[in-house]
Protein backbone atom coordinates (compact mmCIF):
# COMPACT_ATOMS: atom_id res chain seq x y z
CA UNK A 1 0.00 0.00 0.00
CA UNK A 2 1.35 3.37 -0.93
CA UNK A 3 0.67 6.44 1.26
CA UNK A 4 0.86 9.80 -0.42
CA UNK A 5 1.56 12.93 1.64
CA UNK A 6 0.58 16.29 0.32
CA UNK A 7 3.06 19.09 0.92
CA UNK A 8 2.01 22.70 0.57
CA UNK A 9 4.20 24.54 -1.86
CA UNK A 10 4.73 28.15 -0.84
CA UNK A 11 6.14 30.91 -2.93
CA UNK A 12 8.62 33.44 -1.72
CA UNK A 13 7.73 34.62 1.73
CA UNK A 14 8.46 38.14 2.96
CA UNK A 15 11.53 38.48 5.09
CA UNK A 16 10.72 40.00 8.49
CA UNK A 17 12.29 43.32 9.36
CA UNK A 18 15.60 42.93 11.07
CA UNK A 19 16.15 39.32 9.83
CA UNK A 20 18.20 37.95 6.96
CA UNK A 21 17.30 35.34 4.39
CA UNK A 22 19.26 32.68 6.24
CA UNK A 23 17.57 33.37 9.54
CA UNK A 24 14.07 32.85 8.14
CA UNK A 25 12.19 30.38 10.33
CA UNK A 26 8.83 30.73 8.68
CA UNK A 27 7.57 33.69 10.68
CA UNK A 28 5.89 36.13 8.35
CA UNK A 29 4.94 38.82 10.93
CA UNK A 30 7.31 41.76 10.91
CA UNK A 31 9.00 42.40 14.23
CA UNK A 32 7.97 45.88 15.40
CA UNK A 33 10.15 47.95 17.70
CA UNK A 34 8.81 48.47 21.22
CA UNK A 35 6.85 51.65 21.84
CA UNK A 36 8.71 54.68 23.12
CA UNK A 37 11.99 56.31 22.16
CA UNK A 38 15.11 54.20 21.74
CA UNK A 39 17.63 54.93 24.46
CA UNK A 40 21.22 55.84 23.63
CA UNK A 41 23.57 55.27 26.55
CA UNK A 42 26.61 57.52 26.94
CA UNK A 43 29.53 55.57 28.45
CA UNK A 44 31.25 56.89 31.53
CA UNK A 45 34.56 57.54 29.81
CA UNK A 46 32.84 59.82 27.29
CA UNK A 47 31.11 61.65 30.14
CA UNK A 48 34.43 62.16 31.86
CA UNK A 49 36.60 63.06 28.87
CA UNK A 50 34.59 63.46 25.67
CA UNK A 51 31.86 65.86 26.82
CA UNK A 52 34.22 68.41 28.48
CA UNK A 53 36.46 68.38 25.41
CA UNK A 54 33.41 68.86 23.17
CA UNK A 55 32.25 71.86 25.21
CA UNK A 56 35.71 73.45 25.12
CA UNK A 57 36.05 72.88 21.37
CA UNK A 58 32.59 74.33 20.70
CA UNK A 59 33.42 77.40 22.78
CA UNK A 60 36.69 77.96 20.89
CA UNK A 61 34.95 77.68 17.51
CA UNK A 62 32.08 79.98 18.51
CA UNK A 63 34.50 82.57 19.88
CA UNK A 64 36.52 82.52 16.66
CA UNK A 65 33.52 83.01 14.37
CA UNK A 66 31.10 84.73 16.73
CA UNK A 67 29.69 87.11 14.09
CA UNK A 68 29.03 84.27 11.66
CA UNK A 69 27.35 82.26 14.41
CA UNK A 70 25.16 85.26 15.22
CA UNK A 71 24.07 85.62 11.59
CA UNK A 72 23.26 81.92 11.26
CA UNK A 73 21.43 81.92 14.58
CA UNK A 74 19.23 84.83 13.48
CA UNK A 75 18.64 83.14 10.12
CA UNK A 76 17.67 79.88 11.85
CA UNK A 77 15.16 81.65 14.11
CA UNK A 78 13.67 83.48 11.10
CA UNK A 79 13.39 80.21 9.15
CA UNK A 80 11.75 78.43 12.08
CA UNK A 81 9.23 81.26 12.50
CA UNK A 82 8.33 81.39 8.79
CA UNK A 83 8.12 77.62 8.31
CA UNK A 84 4.43 77.36 9.45
CA UNK A 85 3.42 79.99 6.88
CA UNK A 86 5.28 78.14 4.12
CA UNK A 87 3.59 74.85 5.05
CA UNK A 88 0.20 76.56 5.08
CA UNK A 89 0.73 77.77 1.49
CA UNK A 90 1.92 74.31 0.46
CA UNK A 91 -1.37 72.83 1.63
CA UNK A 92 -3.15 74.79 -1.12
CA UNK A 93 -0.92 73.18 -3.78
CA UNK A 94 1.60 76.02 -4.07
CA UNK A 95 5.18 74.77 -4.66
CA UNK A 96 7.57 75.25 -1.75
CA UNK A 97 9.86 77.67 -3.60
CA UNK A 98 6.94 79.87 -4.64
CA UNK A 99 5.54 79.71 -1.09
CA UNK A 100 8.84 80.94 0.34
CA UNK A 101 8.93 83.81 -2.17
CA UNK A 102 5.35 84.83 -1.29
CA UNK A 103 6.06 84.76 2.44
CA UNK A 104 9.23 86.84 2.16
CA UNK A 105 7.74 89.40 -0.19
CA UNK A 106 4.69 89.80 2.06
CA UNK A 107 6.90 90.10 5.13
CA UNK A 108 9.14 92.67 3.42
CA UNK A 109 6.15 94.75 2.28
CA UNK A 110 4.66 94.72 5.79
CA UNK A 111 7.99 95.78 7.31
CA UNK A 112 8.37 98.66 4.84
CA UNK A 113 4.88 99.93 5.64
CA UNK A 114 5.33 99.64 9.41
CA UNK A 115 8.82 101.16 9.50
CA UNK A 116 7.80 103.95 7.14
CA UNK A 117 4.72 104.82 9.19
CA UNK A 118 6.66 104.76 12.46
CA UNK A 119 9.47 106.80 10.92
CA UNK A 120 7.10 109.52 9.75
CA UNK A 121 5.37 109.53 13.14
CA UNK A 122 8.63 109.71 15.10
CA UNK A 123 10.15 112.50 12.99
CA UNK A 124 6.94 114.54 13.01
CA UNK A 125 6.30 114.18 16.74
CA UNK A 126 9.97 114.76 17.60
CA UNK A 127 10.10 118.02 15.68
CA UNK A 128 6.86 119.17 17.32
CA UNK A 129 8.15 118.23 20.78
CA UNK A 130 11.47 119.99 20.11
CA UNK A 131 9.69 123.20 19.09
CA UNK A 132 7.48 123.00 22.15
CA UNK A 133 10.42 122.54 24.51
CA UNK A 134 12.25 125.44 22.88
CA UNK A 135 9.21 127.71 23.33
CA UNK A 136 8.78 126.51 26.93
CA UNK A 137 12.33 127.53 27.79
CA UNK A 138 12.81 130.71 25.73
CA UNK A 139 9.53 132.48 24.92
CA UNK A 140 8.35 135.07 27.45
CA UNK A 141 4.72 134.87 28.54
CA UNK A 142 2.57 137.86 29.61
CA UNK A 143 3.90 141.14 30.95
CA UNK A 144 6.15 139.63 33.62
CA UNK A 145 8.89 138.79 31.17
CA UNK A 146 9.08 135.23 32.50
CA UNK A 147 9.10 132.07 30.49
CA UNK A 148 6.84 129.09 31.15
CA UNK A 149 9.77 127.26 32.74
CA UNK A 150 10.40 130.11 35.21
CA UNK A 151 6.71 130.34 36.08
CA UNK A 152 6.57 126.59 36.73
CA UNK A 153 9.53 126.87 39.09
CA UNK A 154 7.67 129.64 40.99
CA UNK A 155 4.48 127.54 41.09
CA UNK A 156 6.33 124.51 42.43
CA UNK A 157 8.02 126.61 45.11
CA UNK A 158 4.64 128.03 46.08
CA UNK A 159 3.17 124.54 46.32
CA UNK A 160 6.00 123.52 48.65
CA UNK A 161 5.48 126.61 50.80
CA UNK A 162 1.73 125.99 51.07
CA UNK A 163 2.31 122.41 52.27
CA UNK A 164 4.77 123.27 55.02
CA UNK A 165 7.88 122.54 52.98
CA UNK A 166 9.18 126.11 52.81
CA UNK A 167 12.61 124.93 53.96
CA UNK A 168 13.07 123.35 50.55
CA UNK A 169 14.31 126.16 48.33
CA UNK A 170 14.18 125.14 44.69
CA UNK A 171 13.60 128.61 43.20
CA UNK A 172 17.29 129.63 43.12
CA UNK A 173 18.45 126.26 41.82
CA UNK A 174 15.61 126.00 39.31
CA UNK A 175 16.13 129.54 38.08
CA UNK A 176 19.86 128.93 37.73
CA UNK A 177 19.20 125.74 35.74
CA UNK A 178 16.78 127.53 33.40
CA UNK A 179 19.26 130.36 32.88
CA UNK A 180 22.05 127.96 32.02
CA UNK A 181 19.83 126.10 29.56
CA UNK A 182 18.78 129.36 27.93
CA UNK A 183 22.36 130.53 27.63
CA UNK A 184 23.36 127.20 26.12
CA UNK A 185 20.92 127.71 23.23
CA UNK A 186 18.27 124.98 23.69
CA UNK A 187 17.43 125.24 20.00
CA UNK A 188 20.86 123.79 19.32
CA UNK A 189 20.11 120.85 21.63
CA UNK A 190 16.82 120.09 19.91
CA UNK A 191 18.48 120.41 16.51
CA UNK A 192 21.14 117.95 17.65
CA UNK A 193 18.43 115.50 18.66
CA UNK A 194 16.75 115.76 15.27
CA UNK A 195 20.10 115.36 13.51
CA UNK A 196 20.85 112.30 15.61
CA UNK A 197 17.53 110.70 14.68
CA UNK A 198 18.07 111.43 11.01
CA UNK A 199 21.61 110.04 11.20
CA UNK A 200 20.33 106.93 12.94
CA UNK A 201 17.80 106.44 10.15
CA UNK A 202 20.54 106.60 7.52
CA UNK A 203 22.87 104.36 9.52
CA UNK A 204 20.37 101.52 9.12
CA UNK A 205 21.63 101.06 5.59
CA UNK A 206 24.99 100.03 7.02
CA UNK A 207 23.31 96.84 8.22
CA UNK A 208 22.16 96.00 4.71
CA UNK A 209 24.93 93.48 4.06
CA UNK A 210 24.19 91.52 7.24
CA UNK A 211 20.46 91.58 6.56
CA UNK A 212 20.98 90.28 3.03
CA UNK A 213 23.10 87.44 4.39
CA UNK A 214 20.44 86.59 6.96
CA UNK A 215 17.74 86.53 4.29
CA UNK A 216 19.79 84.37 1.91
CA UNK A 217 20.78 81.87 4.62
CA UNK A 218 17.22 81.63 5.96
CA UNK A 219 15.88 81.01 2.42
CA UNK A 220 18.33 78.14 1.97
CA UNK A 221 17.27 76.77 5.35
CA UNK A 222 13.60 76.95 4.39
CA UNK A 223 14.25 75.24 1.05
CA UNK A 224 15.95 72.31 2.81
CA UNK A 225 13.70 72.22 5.87
CA UNK A 226 11.70 69.21 4.65
CA UNK A 227 14.86 67.27 3.85
CA UNK A 228 16.39 68.15 7.21
CA UNK A 229 13.25 67.15 9.11
CA UNK A 230 13.06 63.82 7.28
CA UNK A 231 16.76 63.12 7.95
CA UNK A 232 16.36 63.83 11.67
CA UNK A 233 13.21 61.71 11.88
CA UNK A 234 14.99 58.78 10.23
CA UNK A 235 17.89 58.98 12.65
CA UNK A 236 15.82 59.90 15.72
CA UNK A 237 12.24 58.77 15.07
CA UNK A 238 9.72 60.45 17.37
CA UNK A 239 8.01 58.32 19.98
CA UNK A 240 4.38 57.36 19.29
CA UNK A 241 2.11 60.31 20.03
CA UNK A 242 4.96 62.86 20.25
CA UNK A 243 6.10 65.55 17.85
CA UNK A 244 9.31 65.42 15.76
CA UNK A 245 12.31 67.48 16.84
CA UNK A 246 11.89 70.38 14.41
CA UNK A 247 8.21 70.74 15.23
CA UNK A 248 9.09 70.99 18.93
CA UNK A 249 11.71 73.67 18.26
CA UNK A 250 9.28 75.51 16.01
CA UNK A 251 6.56 75.46 18.64
CA UNK A 252 8.92 76.63 21.40
CA UNK A 253 10.30 79.59 19.42
CA UNK A 254 6.91 80.58 17.99
CA UNK A 255 5.32 80.38 21.44
CA UNK A 256 7.95 82.66 22.93
CA UNK A 257 7.72 85.21 20.11
CA UNK A 258 3.92 85.28 20.27
CA UNK A 259 4.02 85.74 24.03
CA UNK A 260 6.61 88.52 23.81
CA UNK A 261 4.66 90.42 21.15
CA UNK A 262 1.48 90.06 23.18
CA UNK A 263 3.22 91.44 26.27
CA UNK A 264 4.63 94.36 24.23
CA UNK A 265 1.20 95.11 22.79
CA UNK A 266 -0.48 95.05 26.20
CA UNK A 267 2.15 97.21 27.93
CA UNK A 268 2.46 99.66 25.02
CA UNK A 269 -1.32 100.09 24.78
CA UNK A 270 -1.58 100.52 28.56
CA UNK A 271 1.13 103.20 28.55
CA UNK A 272 -0.44 105.04 25.60
CA UNK A 273 -3.95 105.01 27.08
CA UNK A 274 -2.63 106.02 30.51
CA UNK A 275 -0.62 108.95 29.14
CA UNK A 276 -3.57 110.11 27.05
CA UNK A 277 -5.84 109.92 30.09
CA UNK A 278 -3.63 111.90 32.47
CA UNK A 279 -2.97 114.43 29.70
CA UNK A 280 -6.70 114.84 29.00
CA UNK A 281 -7.42 115.27 32.72
CA UNK A 282 -4.79 118.00 32.92
CA UNK A 283 -2.47 116.12 35.27
CA UNK A 284 0.38 116.02 32.73
CA UNK A 285 0.42 118.77 30.12
CA UNK A 286 1.08 117.64 26.55
CA UNK A 287 1.16 113.91 27.29
CA UNK A 288 -2.12 113.35 25.44
CA UNK A 289 -0.62 114.83 22.24
CA UNK A 290 2.27 112.37 22.28
CA UNK A 291 0.52 109.36 23.81
CA UNK A 292 0.69 107.41 20.54
CA UNK A 293 4.41 108.13 20.11
CA UNK A 294 5.32 107.30 23.71
CA UNK A 295 3.09 104.21 23.73
CA UNK A 296 4.76 102.92 20.56
CA UNK A 297 8.17 103.53 22.11
CA UNK A 298 7.18 101.61 25.23
CA UNK A 299 5.94 98.69 23.10
CA UNK A 300 9.20 98.54 21.13
CA UNK A 301 11.35 98.88 24.27
CA UNK A 302 9.35 96.08 25.90
CA UNK A 303 10.97 93.68 23.41
CA UNK A 304 14.20 94.11 25.41
CA UNK A 305 13.81 91.77 28.40
CA UNK A 306 14.06 93.33 31.87
CA UNK A 307 15.60 96.61 30.63
CA UNK A 308 12.83 97.44 28.17
CA UNK A 309 10.17 98.63 30.65
CA UNK A 310 12.55 101.14 32.23
CA UNK A 311 13.94 102.33 28.91
CA UNK A 312 10.43 102.94 27.56
CA UNK A 313 9.54 105.13 30.53
CA UNK A 314 12.50 107.50 30.10
CA UNK A 315 11.21 109.68 27.15
CA UNK A 316 7.79 110.58 28.65
CA UNK A 317 9.34 111.29 32.07
CA UNK A 318 12.02 113.53 30.57
CA UNK A 319 9.39 115.34 28.50
CA UNK A 320 7.28 115.85 31.63
CA UNK A 321 10.27 117.19 33.57
CA UNK A 322 11.03 119.73 30.86
CA UNK A 323 7.49 120.93 30.15
CA UNK A 324 5.89 120.62 33.60
CA UNK A 325 8.04 119.24 36.47
CA UNK A 326 5.04 118.56 38.71
CA UNK A 327 3.43 116.38 36.04
CA UNK A 328 6.51 114.14 36.06
CA UNK A 329 5.27 112.77 39.39
CA UNK A 330 2.03 111.54 37.76
CA UNK A 331 3.90 110.07 34.79
CA UNK A 332 6.29 108.25 37.12
CA UNK A 333 3.42 106.87 39.21
CA UNK A 334 1.68 105.71 36.03
CA UNK A 335 4.71 103.72 34.87
CA UNK A 336 5.29 102.30 38.33
CA UNK A 337 1.73 100.98 38.29
CA UNK A 338 2.14 99.57 34.77
CA UNK A 339 5.37 97.82 35.76
CA UNK A 340 3.71 96.28 38.81
CA UNK A 341 0.86 94.93 36.69
CA UNK A 342 3.36 93.69 34.12
CA UNK A 343 5.54 91.87 36.64
CA UNK A 344 2.74 90.30 38.69
CA UNK A 345 -0.04 89.70 36.15
CA UNK A 346 0.87 90.05 32.47
CA UNK A 347 4.28 88.37 32.27
CA UNK A 348 3.48 85.39 34.55
CA UNK A 349 0.25 84.68 32.68
CA UNK A 350 1.51 85.22 29.12
CA UNK A 351 5.18 84.20 29.27
CA UNK A 352 4.87 81.55 31.96
CA UNK A 353 3.38 79.02 29.57
CA UNK A 354 5.47 80.14 26.58
CA UNK A 355 8.99 79.87 27.98
CA UNK A 356 8.86 77.17 30.70
CA UNK A 357 12.34 78.01 31.98
CA UNK A 358 13.59 78.69 35.50
CA UNK A 359 14.02 82.44 36.20
CA UNK A 360 17.69 81.94 37.13
CA UNK A 361 18.34 80.28 33.78
CA UNK A 362 16.58 83.15 32.02
CA UNK A 363 18.70 85.74 33.82
CA UNK A 364 21.88 83.78 33.08
CA UNK A 365 20.93 83.51 29.40
CA UNK A 366 20.27 87.24 29.12
CA UNK A 367 23.55 88.15 30.81
CA UNK A 368 25.50 85.64 28.72
CA UNK A 369 23.86 86.83 25.48
CA UNK A 370 24.63 90.44 26.30
CA UNK A 371 28.21 89.59 27.23
CA UNK A 372 28.84 87.69 24.00
CA UNK A 373 26.87 89.68 21.39
CA UNK A 374 25.75 92.86 23.16
CA UNK A 375 22.21 94.08 22.53
CA UNK A 376 21.54 91.53 19.71
CA UNK A 377 22.51 88.81 22.14
CA UNK A 378 19.93 90.04 24.64
CA UNK A 379 17.25 89.86 21.94
CA UNK A 380 18.27 86.34 20.87
CA UNK A 381 18.90 84.87 24.32
CA UNK A 382 15.36 83.87 25.23
CA UNK A 383 14.23 82.40 21.88
CA UNK A 384 17.51 80.47 21.76
CA UNK A 385 16.90 79.15 25.28
CA UNK A 386 13.37 78.16 24.27
CA UNK A 387 14.73 76.20 21.30
CA UNK A 388 17.42 74.57 23.43
CA UNK A 389 14.80 73.58 25.98
CA UNK A 390 12.80 71.80 23.26
CA UNK A 391 15.97 70.04 22.00
CA UNK A 392 16.87 69.03 25.56
CA UNK A 393 13.44 67.53 26.14
CA UNK A 394 13.57 65.64 22.84
CA UNK A 395 16.97 64.06 23.41
CA UNK A 396 16.28 63.61 27.12
CA UNK A 397 13.87 60.86 26.08
CA UNK A 398 16.56 59.15 24.03
CA UNK A 399 19.92 59.72 25.72
CA UNK A 400 20.85 58.40 29.14
CA UNK A 401 24.16 58.47 30.93
CA UNK A 402 25.76 55.28 32.14
CA UNK A 403 25.31 55.33 35.94
CA UNK A 404 28.33 55.79 38.14
CA UNK A 405 26.80 54.03 41.16
CA UNK A 406 26.86 50.56 39.66
CA UNK A 407 29.29 48.80 41.97
CA UNK A 408 33.02 48.35 41.41
CA UNK A 409 34.38 48.85 37.92
CA UNK A 410 35.90 45.60 36.58
CA UNK A 411 39.64 45.86 35.96
CA UNK A 412 41.73 43.26 34.13
CA UNK A 413 44.65 42.14 36.32
CA UNK A 414 47.24 39.54 35.41
CA UNK A 415 48.35 37.30 38.31
CA UNK A 416 51.64 35.40 38.28
CA UNK A 417 51.41 31.88 39.71
CA UNK A 418 54.55 31.02 41.72
CA UNK A 419 56.46 27.93 40.58
CA UNK A 420 56.40 24.86 42.83
CA UNK A 421 59.66 24.24 44.80
CA UNK A 422 61.91 21.45 43.55
CA UNK A 423 63.17 18.99 46.30
CA UNK A 424 66.97 18.75 46.45
CA UNK A 425 68.05 16.31 49.10
CA UNK A 426 66.42 17.20 52.38
CA UNK A 427 65.78 20.81 51.34
CA UNK A 428 63.36 22.51 49.01
CA UNK A 429 64.91 24.73 46.41
CA UNK A 430 62.72 27.38 44.78
Image (tube, grey):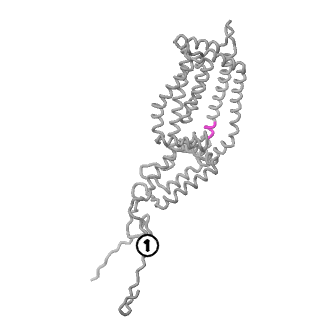
Determine whether 270 is above or below 97 in the image. Answer: above
Whether residue 89 appears in this view of the structure is no
Single out the residue that lies furthest toward the top.
143
Residue in view at x 53 percent, y 51 percent: 229
Determine whether 309 is above or below 327 in the image. Answer: below
Magenta stretch encompasses residue 44: no
Residue 275 located left or right of residue 237: right
Magenta stretch encompasses residue 107: yes
Residue in view at x 42 percent, y 52 percent: 240
| Mark 1 nearby-residue class (10 Å; few <14, some 14–19, many ≥20) | few
Examine the image and state in which quarter residue 104 appears.
top right
Q: Position of residue 255 (x, y in %)?
A: 50, 40
Q: Position of residue 171 (x, y in %)?
A: 62, 14
Image quarter hosting the C terminus: bottom left
Image quarter hosting the N terminus: bottom left
Residue 127 located left or right of residue 221: right
Whether residue 36 appears in this view of the structure is yes
Q: Position of residue 341 (x, y in %)?
A: 47, 28
Single out the residue that lies furthest toward the bottom.
425
> Magenta: predominant secondary structure element?
helix
Q: Secondary structure at mark 1?
A: loop
* Residue corresponding to mark 1: 413
Residue situated in front as seen by the camera: 159 or 226: 159
Which residues fall within the magenta stretch? 104-108
Determine whether 185 is above or below 392 in the image. Answer: above
Q: Position of residue 276 (x, y in %)?
A: 55, 20
Residue situated in front as seen by the camera: 394 or 36: 394
Q: How many marks?
A: 1
Single out the residue that lies furthest toward the front.
426
Examine the image and state in which quarter residue 36 appears.
bottom left
Amino acid sequence: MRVERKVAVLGERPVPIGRSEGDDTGVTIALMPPPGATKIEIPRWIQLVGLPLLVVAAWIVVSAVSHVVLLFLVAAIVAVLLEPLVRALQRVWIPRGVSIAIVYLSFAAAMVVVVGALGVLVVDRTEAAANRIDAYLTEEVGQTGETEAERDVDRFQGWLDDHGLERIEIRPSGQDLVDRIQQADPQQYTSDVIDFLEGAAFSIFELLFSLVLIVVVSIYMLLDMDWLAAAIDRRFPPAPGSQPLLRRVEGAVAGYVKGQFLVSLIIGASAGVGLWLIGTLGWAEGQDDYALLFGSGVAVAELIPYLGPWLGAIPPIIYALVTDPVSAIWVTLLFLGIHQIEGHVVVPKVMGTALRLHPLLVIFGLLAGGQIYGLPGVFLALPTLAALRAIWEFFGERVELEPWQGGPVPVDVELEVPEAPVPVGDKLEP
